Amino acid sequence: MSETLTILRSVSRDLTKRICADSSIEPYDQARTFNLIERQVDGLDDIHQLLRRLERRSDCCIVRGAIADPARTRGVRRLLHPDGGDQPTLREVPRRWLALDFDLPSRPNWITPTDLLSCGHLAIETLPHEFRRARFIVQATAGHGLKPGIRVRLWCWLTRPTTGSELKYWLRRTPADPSVFGAAHIIYTAAPRVQPGAFDPLTVRLEVVPSDTDTVTVPAPARLKPPKLPPRQRDDRNDDISGLIRTVETAGGQPNNRNNALYWAARRCADRGLCDTDTANRLEEAAMRAGLSQSEAAATVKSGLRHG
């Protein structure tokens, strides 16, 4: 069964981190506009070939979402919802391919960062049993080998197209980062740039974990739905979070101010019972317009919705 994968090509920004001579890592540029491209993939082998090419493309990245309008793919923003007169450019779709991000805090002393297969196996062991015997691609992220622990991305192929909400529920008790299941969340694929005088601890950043099984068996949809909560009375006015969005967008000054405003707004949304993906995406997009990075925004929103 054929599948597509959406590539974003930055119009003017670098989509790769930079390793400095003092071993610090400079963050990604904040790209605003992209050209959108879809590529057909028929399995994990196609994903592997594509990742090898994208590893050398510092202007490209991947998202889970599909192109919303084939007539609008050049110089567009990365949007799931209308914003400031700009129409959505991406839409949510179930996917058979899956990327899983891991920042495991510790790594056994007998495993080196260059042993990507062993690092990948440790990440796989944290996943449900359906993942344990499948084939994977292990991709080192920019901080792997420079920061403590294991920082890898696993790619696999599923037996059926699966939605982001199903993945969040299925993998809710694992250390896999759930933000990567969002349709507009950037999945960075380029290898980091090594500045003069810097040391890159890895010569290889992509490996394949072999197995006799090419796919991960996904449970039936009924098993990946959270239990229904008892119905309750709600004031429809609670659904209007435009005021909270404006508060996040206009929170200037230091990054802490923007984070605090975002955290407060997320908690207020949770207090109203608005903990859905749409609310989280709107808060994240508002925070990025205010100047926060995508990873900062996603982490703060997640924390605020959880503690509200």
Image: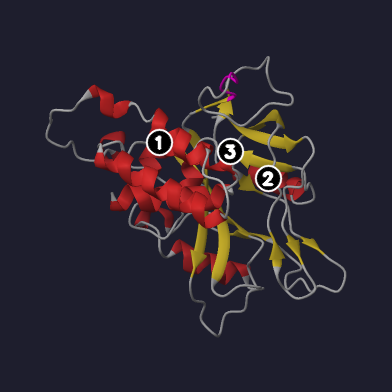
The answer to whether residue 180 of the structure is visible from this angle is yes
- Where residue 44 appears, as percent x and y from the top left, is 60, 45
In the rendered view, tell whether residue 47 sits above or below residue 20.
above
- Where residue 28 appears, as percent x and y from the top left, is 69, 52
Q: Quadrant of residue 47?
A: top right
In front: label 3 or label 1: 1
- Where residue 38 appears, as percent x and y from the top left, is 67, 29
Q: Residue at image x 40%, y 50%?
A: 263
Q: Residue at image x 34%, y 52%?
A: 172
Q: Are marks 3 and 1 in contact (CB under 8 Å)?
A: no
The answer to whether residue 160 of the structure is visible from this angle is no
* Label 3: few (<14), some (14–19) or many (≥20) C-alpha neighbours in 10 Å: some
The magenta segment: 85-89
Q: Which mark is residue 169?
A: none
Q: Are marks 2 and 1 in contact (CB under 8 Å)?
A: no
List the residue tagged with mark 3: 289
Q: Hey, which residue is sitting farthest front in the picture?
A: 253
List the residue tagged with mark 2: 30
List the residue tagged with mark 1: 244
Q: Hey, which residue is sitting farthest top in the picture?
A: 71
Q: Residue at image x 45%, y 58%?
A: 133
**Which amino acid type corresponds to the residue marked 1 in the rendered image?**
Leu
Any magenta on residue 88?
A: yes
In front: label 2 or label 3: 3
Q: CA distance from mark 3 to mark 1?
A: 14 Å
